[in-house]
Amino acid sequence: TLGWVDNTWDYKQMYNRIRACNTVVERIVGGDNSLSSKVLKDQLLGEAYFLRAYFYQQMLRFYGGVPIITKTYALSDDFNVKRNTYEECINFIIKDCDQASTLLTGKTLDKGRTTALACLALKSRVLIYAASDLHERSKLTAKIISIGAQKLDFLSYASGNQNDRYKLAQTAAKAVMDLGSGYKLGLSAPVSVAEGSNNYKSIAMGGASKAPNIDASAASELIFARYFIIQNNIKHAQQNGPNGYHNWAGNTPIGLLVDDYDMADGTKFSWTNPAQKAAPYQNRDPRFYATILYDGAGWKPRDKVSGNVDPANQIQTGIYDLMDGSNKIDFKGLDTRASSIENWNGSWTGYYYHKFIDTDPNIVDATMSQNVPWPFFRYTEAVFNYIEASIELGELTNAKSWLNKIRFRAGMGAITTTDQAELRNIYRHERRIEMAYEEQRYHDTRRWLIAEETLGRKVTYIKVTGKFKAGKTMSAPYHYDASVYDYTYNSVIENAQENRSWDNKLYFRPFSRDEVNKNHLLEQNPGY
């Protein structure tokens, strides 16, 4: 339904799409159309309300309150419009969601089109955001001191009770859970590590992969997604895969994300633990192996695109001893930025992205498209929203029960804590891992007011070296072998490519100067 809309953070693009939605609403409600079918009219009107709500939601979570526009403008109209308050925007979005849900209830639609369940999922997201600390005035002002009273109205609630907002969020999330089904969330104990990893891969594939061990029924997890067909020639894997396969490494995991995956027994990974530092990719959360490509990880047949240089088909992001005749050389891995295949397009972090790349070995990522759908909303997000609201309302037993269902599906053990603060932190960590690469973490850390200690951390990358053990050697082609090599792994702080820092004004994005110049009543966010 979203077509070619990308950059859904972009203020101008969102209002272009909102104008299109307003056009549909005006023409259907006003009778300026040639449609005779009420069923079709209701469907199109419901979709327009949903999309308008979605686009406003996107702007709201980046900027706070924005001007609510419900009509199409003519050239003679006054384009200077004041921002609406945060609360007004929330109420408007919820109204559109409710209208859309009513119009779409009972409609049988093609996948990829808006459904009543998608409307409820959007409502659930909007209400859990609205209940969050970022929009609770006293907590926001404790973080960002210099905000005038009027600007506070754009960013937070002027009145009301945060607990009441959590109750609304809990109810909205439960409505999604009751109407939807999800995938394997009825377990009473953890599955095996292998099954947990396959469950997670199957969810990411959304029913579109023919790879071994992928369960097509995991498509039941999707509520609203963007689907692709061969004719679109979308090469998502080429854009994000390893350069040693002639791909572009567009999104590469940073070390901070990799390090946040727990050990399989539920304990924290730590570089200060000698055993974990010596073998950092062993015995991790099963979702790690379905999300991250790391040095030594098995991957697709490399000979289909790069020749017979890697019969083992393993990711190579390190520097290794290797024999060249009688000489020992430093061999730069095939997926590094010094690769003999491509010495560009490689990862700066030593890791590659796995999650939404089709694992079907018959798909050559550099030359072929894939059809893995993009999940705008999936069932587990609503479950997380329910868990979060339950924790904040003190309903810890209920929250733990649902949190453990998500963990059991992934092959992780039960959470047993009875402490609210500890459970809150566990939940936030679990949401980070489960929803990785789904446009959640950036917004979550801001709405929880913890961005300074999360987004504000220095980026890290991994430096991998392999040295021959005493009496051992290997000639080309190289492959990972812990019986031949002593591998060392060093986590390094990155300052050259991306020197991160945090400023509290970043809790809200600035409006561009062009937008402020075009609309003199558009008040800028604090700090800009």
Image: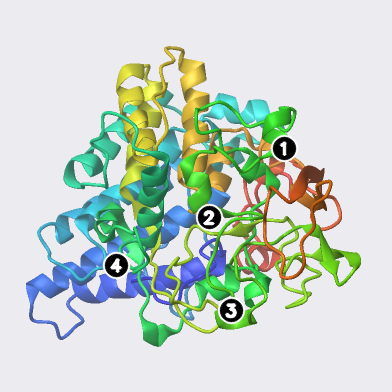
Q: Say which amino acid is labelled 2.
A: Lys
Mark 2 or 3, closer to the camera: 3
Give the residue number, with chain letter if any, for mark 2: 82
Tag 4 and tag 2, C-beta contact below 8 Å: no
Q: Residue furthest right?
A: 327
Q: Residue furthest top?
A: 418
**Residue 462 percent location from the top left of the image:** 75, 49
Compare marks 2 and 1 and give the one earlier in the sequence. Answer: 2
Left or right? Give the position of 19 relative to 446.
Answer: left
Compare marks 4 and 2 and give the one earlier in the sequence. Answer: 4
**Residue 167 percent location from the top left of the image:** 32, 27
Mark 2 or 1, closer to the camera: 1
Q: CA distance from mark 1 to mark 3?
A: 30 Å
The colour scheme is rainbow
Instruction: Give the SS element for disc 1.
Output: helix
**Residue 383 percent location from the top left of the image:** 33, 38
Q: Say which amino acid is labelled 1.
A: Ala
Few, some or many residues within 10 Å of mark 2 (<14, 14–19, 20+): some
Give the residue number, with chain letter if any, for mark 1: 278
Compare marks 4 and 3 and give the one earlier in the sequence. Answer: 4
Q: Which mark is residue 55?
A: none
Q: Which mark is residue 48?
A: 4
Tag 2 and tag 1, C-beta contact below 8 Å: no
Q: Residue furthest front?
A: 471
Give the residue number, with chain letter if any, for mark 3: 303
Left or right? Give the position of 279 relative to 108.
Answer: right
Mark 4 or 3, closer to the camera: 3
Instruction: Give the SS element for disc 3.
Output: helix
Q: CA distance from mark 2 to mark 3?
A: 59 Å
Q: Say which amino acid is labelled 3.
A: Asp
